[in-house]
Amino acid sequence: MEKNIKINIAGSVFQIEEEAFEVLRDYLQQINIRLKNVAGGNEMIEDIEARIAELFNECPSWKTGLISKTDVEEVIEKMGSPDEIAGDMEGEHRVYNQGPARRLYRDMNGSIIGGVCNGLGAYLRIDPVWIRITFILFTLVYLSGLLVYVVLWISLPKANTLARKRELHNYHEKKSDLTKDLKDGVSRAAGKISSAGTEGAEKVGNAFNEVFRAFGKFFIILFRIIIAIIGVAFIIGGFSALLSYIIIAFFQSPILVGSFFDTGFFNINDFLGTLAGPALAPWLIILTSLVIMLPLLGMVYWGIRMVFQFRAKDLVLNIAMFIIWIVSCAALSLLLFSEGISFSHTGRVSDEMLIQGENNLRIEIGKEISSLDYDKTLRVPMDNNIKFYLEKEGNNIYGTPEIQLYYTNEEPCIKVVKYSSGRTTGHAREQADNIKYDISLDENILTLDSFYTIPDGTMWPGTNVKVRIYLNEGMRIFVDEDVDDLFDDYQGNGIYAYELGDNYWIMTEDGLEKDLR
């Protein structure tokens, strides 16, 4: 059975086949013979050793834990023959200093989780197992060890280049015979082992390392599963929200949002056109789409990356998308602020009509919505009593009023209150006064139109019309069936709007009661 040998190259420990070791040993001895008398040759030997360690770490077979003869031959082919290397060195007289200052990095060679303990062990020249035990002990104290580990994991870069490995392991230090170090497998970062007693300590340390490695693999697998679950949630949530926005904004269908919107509702372009004007609406649509869709696309993309755990050189793309999103947010905010000035103040006007000489009141509908020529409807979310309608031709906007019933011990009356917004309070009142709404009281019959009109060519100024009916105790009311849709949903006293139609009611101090006569 072929013997396997543990070797140490540039601070990295490898298991290597005996035949492969002999090939590597001969190669390094030839390089040592050719370069030892060349200016800068010692430093060159150190660089070659570090580069060989890097190439071994990249070998597919090293993942199985053993370097083969084929791996060594491929590395030698990449490095070049001793004659080629010596030829490159001849004529060059590089002067090396004592090496760069030592720096702390994460050492991923033989790491269990993030390479923090390996890096600290190499930097402090002790076995990483003792670093791991220290972290575990301090983790038992209010998780402080775990917190420090995470901070170091985030803040320390990897020793993934030759220069960083030189800084971490200080390869410029004087070494003993290269072949001997390769053969006995002693780590330079951990110092020389000279006594038999330390062999037992090394075995204990190796046992601890195996335990830590098993736990490390378990937690890495668990972490990847959690990341994959989060990634799936990102994909589903981001894709659903993205599809919902596209359908609502561009295809005028609320299929994914249930009854939140009415089945017929404004095209978002038409709605923004009534709100800010047709010239500004396309810009609002574009900017709003960028602000909403870019984060959702990012969620889907990062969800895919988290699930499949692939690497991509997408830093420039991510930065570009983030800059576009920031610019879009800023531009949209400026447009909304400029338009929001038109809604900064609220004003109202009211008309009052007394109810005289009658103890009975009948409420009927005058002009109905069905008499209008419109094709688009908006039901305001969370308030089904407020709707708006847009004409097929022309710029008129129609809205539905709200009817409210109140008890009063003063003279019964009807108040029509019109609300609007504007740049100033005076402008808002002027806008409210321009709202057209017809109401009439003939003896005991109150006739109300089921819609009010915003003047032709006027942008929607955030209007609303409320009809407040104040009645004395004992007054009898009859509500036509077509009128109950205009009432508030809940009338108090356990009565809802849908119960009002085609029934008689009596006003009391506590609200309406059904007239059973």
Image (cartoon, helix red, strand yellow):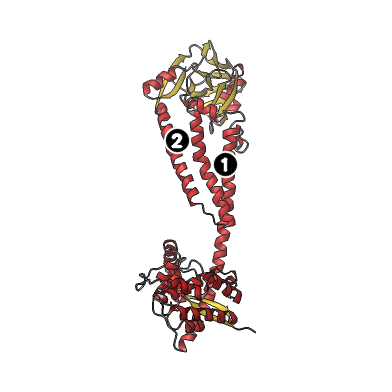
How many C-alpha atoms fall within 10 Å of the one at disc 2: few (<14), some, or many (≥20)? many
- The kind of secondary structure element at disc 1 is helix
Determine which residue is flagged by label 2: 332
Question: Residue extending furthest top?
Answer: 443
Of callouts 1 and 2, the N-terminal one: 1
For marks 1 and 2, give the CA distance: 19 Å
Residue at image position (55%, 14%) is 447
Say whether residue 206 is left or right of residue 498.
left
Nearest the viewer among 379 and 322 is 322
Q: Position of residue 507 (x, y in %)?
A: 52, 23
Above/below status of 264 relative to 57: above
- State the residue position of label 1: 242
* Above/below status of 403 relative to 201: above
- Horizontal and vertical percent position of residue 83: 50, 75
Q: Which residue type does callout 1 highlight?
A: Leu
For badge 2, the amino acid type reads Leu
| Crowding near the residue tagged with mark 1, few <14, some 14–19, many ≥20 C-alpha atoms within 10 Å | many
